Amino acid sequence: MEFTEALRGRRMVRSYRPDPVAEDVLGRVVRMVHRAPSGGFSQGHRLVVITAPEPRRRIAEISERPYGERGFPAWISKAPVHLALGVREASYHERYQQPDKLDADGAEIAWPVPYWWFDSGALLTLIQLAAADEGLATGFFGPDPQRLAELRATVGFPDDVALAGIVTLGYGAEEPDDRSSRTTRARLPLDELVTWVR
Ligand SMILES: Cc1cc2nc3c(=O)[nH]c(=O)nc-3n(C[C@H](O)[C@H](O)[C@H](O)COP(=O)(O)O)c2cc1C
């Protein structure tokens, strides 16, 4: 697939066909974790690839109801793959306590932004692009804070890995009534988002 086509294909899809995704295809998508940038090469990304029906059913049971209440058709329960996006913050502290990363006072840097969350977003985009390249559709949802413990228990990350959210993956189906914020809100003009200093 042309790169520009994959870029155009990167969007959040909330409708999937039931067809499973072959493991070699999934393997090519998730190995993006090796291509993803990370501050100081801290490599704090962690992924759990869930194709087994029971944990996916449980994830949907925990997470899907609010979407139904807002008129979305079922999508989390339909996606044949759930990919849990995890962040190990400790990897960053460990890395930035190494001599080449200490600040002028010999201390860990005052983090300008939490790089671990920043890097997780970058990985999400790479995963979406790699999936688009494989002809797959992807979505994403953040955990409901009220039900985070249940979701974490289902995904099975160790205690030192935070759950950034779940990527849904599969072959896209028709979205007859696309209720995404993308379609219900106006796109801001480019000039409001991009400033040029020439
Ligand atoms: C950090 C983040 C959190 C998001 N959380 C959700 C979510 O909980 N549920 C959902 O359906 N979409 C979620 N989205 C998808 C956004 O709604 C979507 O990216 C946005 O409307 C733009 O649409 P597009 O990505 O298809 O271009 C999230 C996206 C990001 C980057």
Image: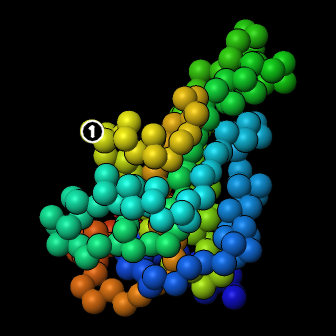
Above-or-below relation of 4 to 10: below
- Callout 1, which amino acid? Gln
Q: Residue furthest top?
A: 105
Q: Quadrant of residue 56?
A: bottom left
Q: Position of residue 168 (x, y in %)?
A: 47, 66
Q: Position of residue 73 (x, y in %)?
A: 25, 76
Would residue 14 be seen by someone viewing this image from the given angle? yes
Residue at point 54% right, 29% down? 159
Q: Quadrant of residue 186?
A: bottom left
Local secondary structure at mark 1: helix
Above-or-below relation of 175 to 168: below
Residue, disc 1: 146
Q: Nearer the viewer, residue 53 or 138?
A: 53
Q: Position of residue 174 (x, y in %)?
A: 37, 90
User: On the picture, is 107 further left or further right than 74?
Assistant: right
Q: Residue furthest front?
A: 54
